[in-house]
Image (cartoon, rainbow, N blue to C red):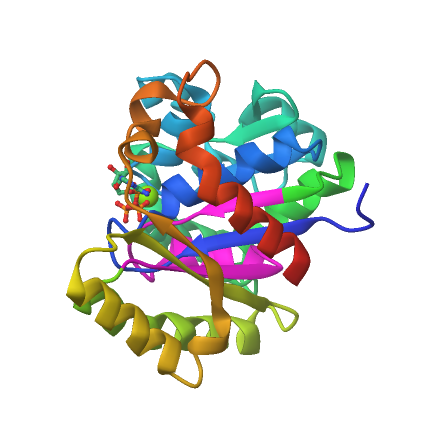
């Protein structure tokens, strides 16, 4: 057992950069290695929920998701575990998400601020996670985030101990990096002084594409981002793309799908 819980936030506001795939793969590999893992979905798309629960219809979790856990401001850790945390595999629990997560900001600024004056709307998820951990001290919490830098992302970063940025080699993703790290900086200054950046994971790599090579080199050569890049890169491969069809529990090509993620997790553990 590790002395403290490591809370890893996976993010980048660029859509389709393999946030959910990487968060799910990391959660699965850590659980396989014997760690107790809580995965938290904060995206209304519910992709992490799909990937880890194997449940096709994420509305099965309606009313029992991260959003309701955040709304249960006065609930005890036991109550949060009982109502919003679902066992989805050996040593793997999930706090799921579905469409209503998109109403988080409305609730935060209309109701939460009115009913809880003086409390910071950016710290609501952090308070949920801390109450849960006081009852069940998971080794790792893995937070997946939506492709935006809104309230879910602020709450996710504020709840985390470590941030991992995804980089999918495209101009749009390159353009997203400065604002992403500005947000990390802001959250660290305002809400979570001990937040650390663990690294940048390059995903969706296609070796034969010259533009991919160029974009990766641009990040490698950058004095801020270069040292953060993980050595492991995640290549585009069909087995990894099919994780959302085949799942994690009875997937005959799981080893092939996760082979690079296993190396990535080793690097993450070494950097913690
Ligand atoms: N290494 C890979 N090889 C092939 N396909 C992949 C790989 N990684 C992810 N994909 C596929 O790419 C798509 C986007 O991945 P994913 O949903 O993980 O990205 P995301 O950043 O979470 O997206 P969003 O911003 O919408 O939340 C998915 O269909 C996923 O299955
Ligand atoms: Mg996603």
In the foreground, 63 or 90: 90
- Where in the figure is residue 163, as x and y percent of width and height? 52, 61
Numbered label tally:
0
**In the shown orientation, is residue 181 left or right of residue 86?**
left
In the foreground, 104 or 152: 152
Which of the 4 quarters of the picture holds residue 243? top left
- Residue 58 magenta: no
Q: Residue at x 29, y 38 (%)?
A: 237
Q: Residue at x 32, y 30 (%)?
A: 239
Considering every residue shown, the one lying at the far top of the view is 250
Which of the 4 quarters of the picture holds residue 56? top left
**Residue 121, can we see it?**
no
Quadrant the C terminus occupies: bottom right
**Residue 258, can we see it?**
yes
Q: Residue at x 35, y 19 (%)?
A: 246
Considering every residue shown, the one lying at the far front of the view is 208
**In the shown orientation, is residue 242 left or right of residue 78?**
left
Q: Residue at x 37, y 48 (%)?
A: 19
Magenta region, residue range: 141-168
Quadrant the N terminus occupies: top right
**In the shown orientation, is residue 21 left or right of residue 91?**
left
Q: Eyeballing the image, is 174 above or below 20?
A: below
- Residue 157 magenta: yes
Q: Eyeballing the image, is 202 above or below 184?
A: above
- Where in the figure is residue 143, as x and y percent of width and height? 50, 46
Considering every residue shown, the one lying at the far bottom of the view is 223
Which of the 4 quarters of the picture holds residue 140? top right
Q: Eyeballing the image, is 227 above or below 151?
A: below
- Where in the figure is residue 147, as x and y percent of width and height? 29, 53
Ligand 1 is found in the corner quadrant, namely top left
- Where in the figure is residue 124, as x and y percent of width and height? 54, 52
């Amino acid at each position: 057992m590790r002395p403290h819980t490591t809370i890893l936030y996976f993010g980048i506001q660029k859509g389709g950069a393999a946030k959910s795939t990487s968060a799910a793969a990391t959660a699965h590999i850590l659980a396989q290695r014997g760690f107790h893992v809580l995965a938290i979905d904060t995206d209304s798309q519910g992709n992490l929920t799909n990937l880890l629960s194997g449940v096709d219809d994420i509305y099965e979790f309606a009313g029992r998701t991260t959003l309701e856990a955040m709304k249960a401001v006065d609930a005890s850790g036991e109550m949060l575990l009982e109502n919003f945390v679902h066992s989805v595999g050996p040593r793997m629990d999930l706090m799921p998400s579905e469409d209503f997560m998109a109403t988080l900001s409305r609730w935060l600024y209309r109701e939460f601020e009115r009913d809880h004056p003086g409390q910071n709307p950016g710290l609501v998820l952090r308070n949920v996670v801390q109450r849960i951990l006081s009852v069940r001290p998971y080794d790792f919490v893995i937070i997946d985030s939506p492709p935006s830098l809104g309230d879910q992302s602020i709450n996710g970063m504020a709840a985390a101990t470590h941030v991992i940025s995804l980089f999918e080699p495209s101009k749009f993703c390159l353009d997203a990096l400065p604002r992403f790290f500005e947000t990390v900086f802001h959250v660290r200054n305002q809400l979570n002084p001990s937040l650390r950046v663990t690294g940048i994971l390059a995903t969706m790599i296609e070796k034969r594409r010259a533009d991919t090579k160029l974009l990766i080199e641009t990040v490698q050569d950058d004095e801020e981002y270069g040292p953060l890049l993980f050595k492991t890169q995640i290549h585009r491969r069909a087995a990894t793309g099919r994780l959302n069809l085949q799942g994690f529990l009875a997937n005959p090509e799981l080893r092939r799908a996760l082979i690079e993620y296993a190396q990535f997790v080793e690097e993450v553990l070494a950097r913690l």
